[in-house]
Structure formats: structure tokens, C-alpha cells
Amino acid sequence: MPFFTKMNRSDLYDSYMSLDAAVACGDHAGMISQPYQLYVERMDPAKNMARFYAMEIEQTIFGEACLTRRWGRIGKSGQEKQHVFEREEEAVLLFLDLLKQKRARGYLPRTALQSSQS
């Protein structure tokens, strides 16, 4: 009998080990607990400054938390950087730290920016 026909077809699985990283780590399986998204802008016509900064936390296909940052001049594609973490809490801490830095530099949400210029 050829080798490839000697498979155990009585079970649906050929292994009892899980390939799910969240189950293997003992962490809760599932998606990010809540959506984390931010878009802020900084404008100063006197300096010809029109910048944006955007962040979001999403789950990778491997169950890790990924913080994606995008920044640049408004109307341009800008730059992007991704940070991957094993735990969502680590991504949230960086998200909040970066938010604090951007607020200190004068970045505001678009609606707040529009109302302050009126």
C-alpha cells in the first residue's frame, strides 16, 4: 500500500494541538475589546502648516494587536509605521502616550479645529 493512503481518516483532525495562538497562550480568544481610532490635525496658515496624524489598533491574522500610525501633510499620502504587540494592553498604552504627545503639540480633532477657527 502506498504511503499517502495510510492516513487516519477516523478523526476530523490529525493533531490535538491547537494552532490558535490565543488559546495556546491562555489569553482570551477574539477580537480587540473596543475600537481605537484617532484622527487629529494641526494647522497654522502663517507657517504654511497643515498636518494630520492618524492611529488605529487592529488585530493581525495571528491574533496580535497592531497599532498603525499614519502622518504627513493634509492631502498627501504621508508615512506609515506599524507596531505589533502580543497583548492589546501594550498597544493601548502606546496609543495613549502618542495621543498625549500630539495634544501637547497642538493637534486637535477635525471638528474641534473647525469650531476654533470660526
Image (cartoon, helix red, strand yellow):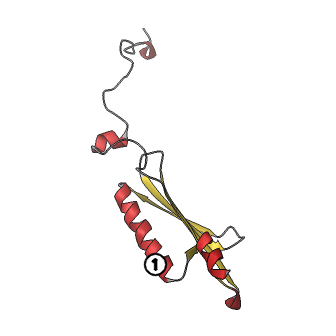
Question: Residue 93's spot in the image, x, y percent?
Answer: 37, 66
What quarter of the picture does the C terminus occupy?
bottom right
Question: Residue 42's spot in the image, x, y percent?
Answer: 61, 79
Residue 12 in the figure: left or right of residue 46? left
Q: Residue at x 35, y 55 (%)?
A: 87
Q: Residue furthest top?
A: 1
Q: Quadrant of residue 20?
A: top left
Q: Which residue is mark 1?
A: 101
Which sits in the foreground, 100 or 17? 100
Q: Residue at x 54, y 82 (%)?
A: 106
Residue 9 in the figure: left or right of residue 57? left
Image height check: is 12 above or below 21? above
What quarter of the picture does the N terminus occupy?
top left
Q: Quadrant of residue 92?
A: bottom left
Report crowding for label 1: few under 14, some 14 to 19, many 20 or more residues within 10 A (C-alpha). Answer: few
Which sits in the foreground, 116 or 90? 116
Q: Residue furthest bottom?
A: 46
Q: Residue at x 42, y 46 (%)?
A: 63
